[in-house]
Image (tube, rainbow, N blue to C red):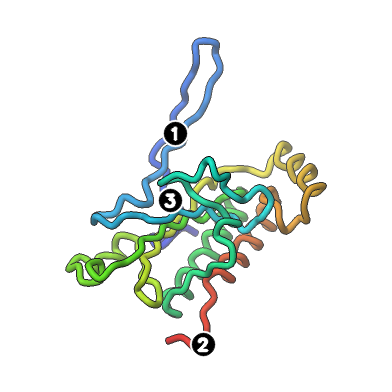
Amino acid sequence: MITKETFIVPLLGLYQVTEINGRSEYICVMKNLFSISTDRIIDEIFDLKGSKLDRMTPPENRKPGVPLKDLDFGERVILLPRKTSKKILQQLTDDATFLSQIMKTMDYSMLVGIHISSKETIQDPKVSNIERDGGYFSLTKEKIYYFGIIDYLVEYDTKKHLETMVKEFRAPKEEISSLSPELYASRWVKYLTEKMSWSPKMK
């Protein structure tokens, strides 16, 4: 069940573009996750699937606004207050359940935007609106995180079954992105839980 707290980024439209030769392509338009009502710049963007095979952005593609991937994120973790972390992980689990059991889709990503905070950011009178804008302060308030689930319309069809078979020759199953909806959701939630783990030593 989808609630207003969902991290699934809303679809705004689906367009069909037909070329002169009759070939058609479909363009899916989603809400801009980073269309926040302040001047905060998104310093880093990551597209996280929880897989490893081919999950690094080539050096020539590393430009402002281009998302980096799982292997670029490496061993980093997302440190949030414990209550916030638990709330987010529960909603992500609910969203993954909806996508795997109701939508029957896979290969979606957690889009993570990171704003590096400054003294000016923290003192900004609009700072109380951060969560309303979809942002979350890190535990140390050094970063503001923005989260959204994107690319969630991919079905596990015959093409994806074949992709799984081919990729299993290159890497273990837990490292590839093409998995059945149930396995994909389970691996995705486990990966994000590890990235948002909270240490009891922190307050």
The residue pinned by badge 1 equals 14
Q: Residue at x 20, y 71 (%)?
A: 123
Q: Dot 1: what SS?
A: strand
Mark 1 vs mark 2: which is more N-terminal? 1
Q: Residue furthest bottom?
A: 201
Q: CA distance from mark 1 to mark 3?
A: 14 Å
Disc 2 designates what residue? 200
Instruction: Name which of mark 2 and mark 3 comes first in the sequence.
Output: 3
Marks 1 and 2: CB-CB under 8 Å?
Answer: no
Q: Which residue is mark 3?
A: 9
| 32 or 157: nearer the viewer | 32
Residue 75 on image: x %, y %: 58, 67
Is 100 drawn above or below residue 66 in the view shown? below
Q: Nearer the viewer, residue 203 or 1?
A: 203
Percent coordinates x, y for residue 201 in the rendering: 50, 89
Labels 1, 2: front one: 2
Vertical comparison of 22 with 83: above or below: above
Asked whether the residues under the numbered discs 2 and 3 touch, taking CB atoms below 8 Å apart as contact, a structural biologist would say no
Q: Position of residue 168 (x, y in %)?
A: 79, 49
Residue 128 visible, this angle: no
In-image side of 70 versus 65 (left or right)? right
Residue 175 place in picture, x, y as percent: 71, 56
Neighbourhood count class around disc 3 (C-alpha, 10 Å): few under 14, some 14–19, many 20 upward: some
Q: Amino acid at mark 3?
A: Val
Helix, strand or loop for disc 3? loop
Q: Earlier in the sequence, mark 1 or mark 3?
A: 3
What is the secondary structure assignment of the residue under circle 2? loop
Q: Nearer the viewer, residue 125 or 15?
A: 125
Residue positioned 46% across, 57% down in the render: 112
Q: Quadrant of the C terminus?
A: bottom left
Circle 1 packing at 10 Å, graded few (<14), some (14-19), many (20+), is few
